[in-house]
Every structure is written in structure tokens, then in C-alpha cells.
Image (spheres, rainbow, N blue to C red):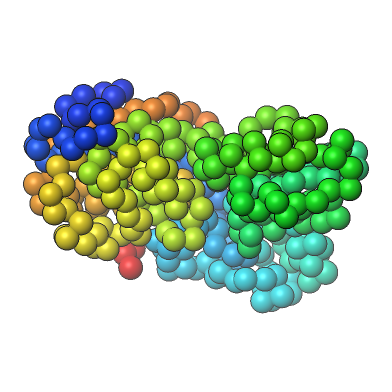
Amino acid sequence: MTEPAVTSSDTPSSVSGNGAAPTRRTKKVLLAAPRGYCAGVDRAVVTVEKALELYGAPVYVRKQIVHNKFVVQTLEKRGAIFVDETDEVPEGATVIFSAHGVAPVVHEEARARSLKTIDATCPLVTKVHREAVRFADDDFDILLIGHEGHEEVEGTAGEAPDHVTLVDGPDDVENVTVRDPEKVVWLSQTTLSVDETMQTVDRLKQKFPLLQAPPSDDICYATQNRQLAVKAMAKDTDLMIVVGSRNSSNSVRLVEVALEHGARAGHLVDFADEIDEAWLAGVATVGLTSGASVPEVLVRDVLAWLAERGYGDVEAVIAAEESLLFSLPNEIRRDLKARGKQAEKVRHDAAFESADSRH
Ligand code: SF4
């Protein structure tokens, strides 16, 4: 395969910046940074790997550990069994809760079945759960901005079901009612479009002027940074390719953000071989990024695929630096320690550096 050469700059310099077609038709790739694995995904995936190492296969995982087809397939081959609900897990077995978090009722169900649980909920999702509990304790109506049916939203809403109302985008605001307009707060799913969420908040504020904001950003650093990088390069790209799965909220948002900010076309693909050659017709500059649940090996596959078609020049567009790492869940750290093994903080993308699995 042709190896692409990557150069780096903060802004894409050799293409036009006014939304018009590129003035130079040299084929190139603008590669977003940051992209791919966030700290919460890294932690969740390594949690499953360490559980397999510690307890042996099978290890059960409730829901997809992270929303990525390749990650799930790879872990399945290593002995993970993904289930939808805890009642599919044999009594007394080990079950891992995914990065998206679970409602308290799921913990209760697991206890009733004597399951050993390992909670891989991202600490930034847990933070939103705590906010929900705190505002519910103060008897606020909580307007949770998020996508209906998403696991994270179900988990957060489940912390305070009597206080939470889901608001699924700006157009949903007209349906929202509260008990007391002086005690209302908004919270959000961690993986939303920043811009669309602020539109929703603006409409909510028009309806409820005393609406309170969360104590700190609910949309997480990784979601925000990946969107920032896409915004920085979108107007200069003829085609934006986002590597990610269709059920990955933050990946889907990256395509939307690219199109809203000037990319002339945008597509989401799980794998390089899903790219349609026809998408490249008349394309000089390809933008490339990946969702927060996507291992870098899949981006490298896309870069190689593009290099074979003449897009061998790669320029990094750097919007932010990331260094956040999370510790593994307590249960894993405790059991690693008991076996004399080091429980280091998770290293970015460590789980799939030598991936041997393809669809
Ligand atoms: S996208 Fe954000 S909230 Fe979700 S797992 Fe990653 S860091 Fe955590």
C-alpha cells in the first residue's frame, strides 16, 4: 500500500478559504486533529480487555461497549459476549456496563441476579448523572437535551425519572412543559452538536427565562474538540470522510457539522472499503476525521486507500491538543493489583494498535 506523508499546520494553507472551489486542484487530504479515541472510550475498551485477561472468556458486556462495529467485532473474537439486557447474563457471571452509562435500575437488576459488575461508564457521563441527581434532590425540573432512545440519555434520565424531560432538538421545545418555570435547569447528552444544542438552549430560554445552565459543560471535551477540527477545515474540503459507525452519535454529528460549515459533501464509513470511488469525482481536497469510538487503525486504512488514488499528500489540521487519561474502573484495578499487575492509566488507542481483526 502507498504510505501517505503527513505534514502539520494549524490551518489548511494551500486551499481557498472563502467557500469557493479550491484554486489549486492538487489532490490532498486534510487530516483532523484531534480525532478518534477519547479517554472514555479508551478506558472502556481496555476494561473489557483486562477483564478477559483477569477472568477469562466469556465476559459479558451490556450493550455495545462503545458504538463502533470494528471494536465490538474485535472484542467478540477475543471472548466478549454483548447482550442487550442483564437478564441475558447467566447468574453469578461478570458483566461490564458500557461507556454510555446505565440507570440505577440496571444496577439493581444485576444485584438481583448476583452478577459481578464492572462499570465502564465514562467519568464524564457519570458527572452528568450526578448533576441530574443533585438537581432532582433540589426538586428542579431537568430538561435533558439529547436523542430519544440513545443509551446515554436513558441512563441519565433513569437517575431521576420523575424530574427529567427529554428535549430532542430545537423543534421539540414547543412541547416542553414544566411544573415551576422558576426551577428549571438544562443538562445534555455528552456527544451532541455544540451549535445545535445552543439553538435548543436559546429556544428554551425564550420559553423559560429563568432556565439554569449546567455547572460545567456537559458536551464533553472530546466531542467539542473533534467538532472544532472539522469546523476549521470544512470550508476547504470538497469531500469530508468521517470514520465511524451509524449508531455513534458523535460520529454522525461530525458529518452534520462538516456540511453545516461548508464541506461540499460528507459521508460516514465504518471501513475504507465502504468509500465509493464515485465520491472522488472532481474532488481536490478530502477532509478526514473519525469519531471518538474509532481506533486509529481504521483511519490509517482510509489514508492508504486514498493514497492509492492519488491523495498521498496529507496535512494535519490541529484544533486542540488532548492529554486526558482516565484510571481503569476500581474493580479492575483491585483485581490487577491482587495479581501483582500494574494498573496504569489507559494509553490512547492501546487496545487496537496491533489489531488483527477485520470485518
Ligand atoms: S465521547 Fe466524551 S463522554 Fe463519551 S466516552 Fe468519550 S470522553 Fe466520555
Q: Is residue 2 left or right of residue 267?
A: left
In this picture, is 279 found above or below 221?
below
- Disc tally is 0
Identified at 30% across, 42% down, the residue is 263
Identified at 30% across, 30% down, the residue is 317
Q: Is residue 279 visible?
A: yes
Whole-percent x and y of residue 283? 16, 47
Whole-percent x and y of residue 129? 74, 45
Identified at 16% across, 60% down, the residue is 277
Q: Is residue 6 visible?
A: no
> Dividing the image into 4 quarters, which one contains the C terminus?
bottom left
In this picture, is 221 found above or below 156?
above
Q: Quadrant of residue 7?
A: top left
Identified at 46% across, 63% down, the residue is 72
Whole-percent x and y of residue 288? 29, 44
Q: Nearer the viewer, residue 270 or 115?
A: 270
Q: Is residue 158 left or right of residue 195?
A: right
Whole-percent x and y of residue 75? 46, 62
Q: Nearer the viewer, residue 35 or 70?
A: 35
Q: Quadrant of residue 91?
A: bottom right
Q: Nearer the viewer, residue 97 or 56?
A: 97
Q: Is residue 133 left or right of residue 89?
A: right
